[in-house]
Amino acid sequence: MPEAYTLVESASLAPLNTLRVAATTRWLAEVSDAAALPHLLAHDAAREGVLVLGEGSNVLFASDFPGLVLRPAFQAVCTLEDDGRTALVRAEAGMNWDVLVDWTLARRLSGLENLALIPGLAGAAPIQNIGAYGVEVAECIETVEAWDRVRQRFERLAREDCGFGYRDSEFKRTPERWIVTAVEFRLSRAPQLRLDYAGVRDELAALGTGEPTPQRVAEAVRRLRRRKLPDPEVIGNAGSFFKNPVVDASFATQLKASHPDAPVYPAGGHSKLSAAWLIERCGWRGFRDGDAGIAAKHALVLVNHGRASGAELLSLARRVARSVEERFGVRLEPEPRIVGERW
């Protein structure tokens, strides 16, 4: 069904990634109906590899892409069931994530409010297991629909089959196999608000009097994110570039003993450190080398001041990670997918 997608040869990817890195792809396809995927993937354009690209907010192009870049444009959303206590919401992969958060809040459904203003599409949420302010999206996911390129069929994966981990999933570990087409979320009509992370209560207090609600939490989170993170429309960036490292609790205790101001969070029998704190203590916040740099407001954000190449940004990220490991003995890992190079 060619009418369900457009196919462009030798397309620029610079306007399609928030780091604003100059790169090209041999073929670019925009797909308006997930049912067209089998037909598109049988096209010669897919022979040199397929890369699914949503809003380009979690990718670093270290080189051009030799195959097919696929952009999902199917974006329907609906409530599949609602028993008055919980509701099951189905969102197609091409729906903007923050629009989806607002759609659920407008229907008095809670669960996604702490994830407001995370850039990207709904289909990327389970791949990255996006998280913020004490919540991971896996907590709300019931089922992920995806095209299985190995079995050549659409599959429905229950949450327990998705291999969710910290900023990780089966879809992220084997991107050559899965193309996420829709996500089903189990959301609540009885909010259990998560307010004890990274200034959420303080921001709610700043908003004024009144009981916390999911809508107010989302507003507080948006205010926090806008204040802390640079706007990709103003300066190229992909948000937080490094994962917060998870370490043995004993290691975290030792770090805390020598650095009492080091943020440490419990993480299922382990401890999670602040990558931003580690990077800042190594002196990188606000650093710039040519057009590749680290944000002045937040040490976790790699920025493109104009014409930095993907290779230059990757080189800087490696320097940052190396300095953290040398000083603290902690290895940092990138959050974005790096295309064309290994970390």
Image (cartoon, rainbow, N blue to C red):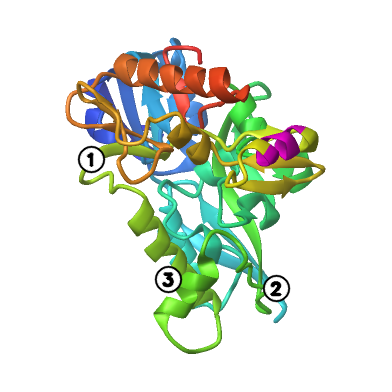
Q: Say which of marks 2 and 1 sits in front.
A: 1
| Residue contact between numbered discs 2 and 1, judged by CB atoms under 8 Å | no
Residue 219 image label: 3
Q: Label 1 belongs to which residue?
A: 235
Identify the residue at image location x=42%, y=71%. Answer: 219
How far apart marks 3 and 2 lie (CA) works out to 22 Å
Q: Residue 262 appears at what percent x and percent y?
A: 59, 43
Instruction: Point out the residue furthest to the front here.
Output: 258
Mark 3: amino acid: Glu
Chain-order first, disc 3 or disc 2: 2
How dense is the environment of label 2, judged by Cα within 10 Å: few (below 14), some, or many (20 and up)? some
- The magenta span reads 251-257
Viewer-side residue, 103 vs 60: 60
Q: Main secondary structure of the magenta part?
A: helix
Q: Is label 2 in a helix, a strand or a loop?
A: strand
Q: Which residue is mark 2?
A: 86
Q: Residue furthest right?
A: 269
Q: Amino acid at mark 2?
A: Thr
Q: Position of residue 230 (x, y in %)?
A: 30, 47
The first of marks 2 and 1 along the sequence is 2
Image quarter in which the N terminus is found: top left
Which amino acid type corresponds to the residue marked 1 in the rendered image?
Ile
Q: Is residue 343 above or below residue 133?
A: above
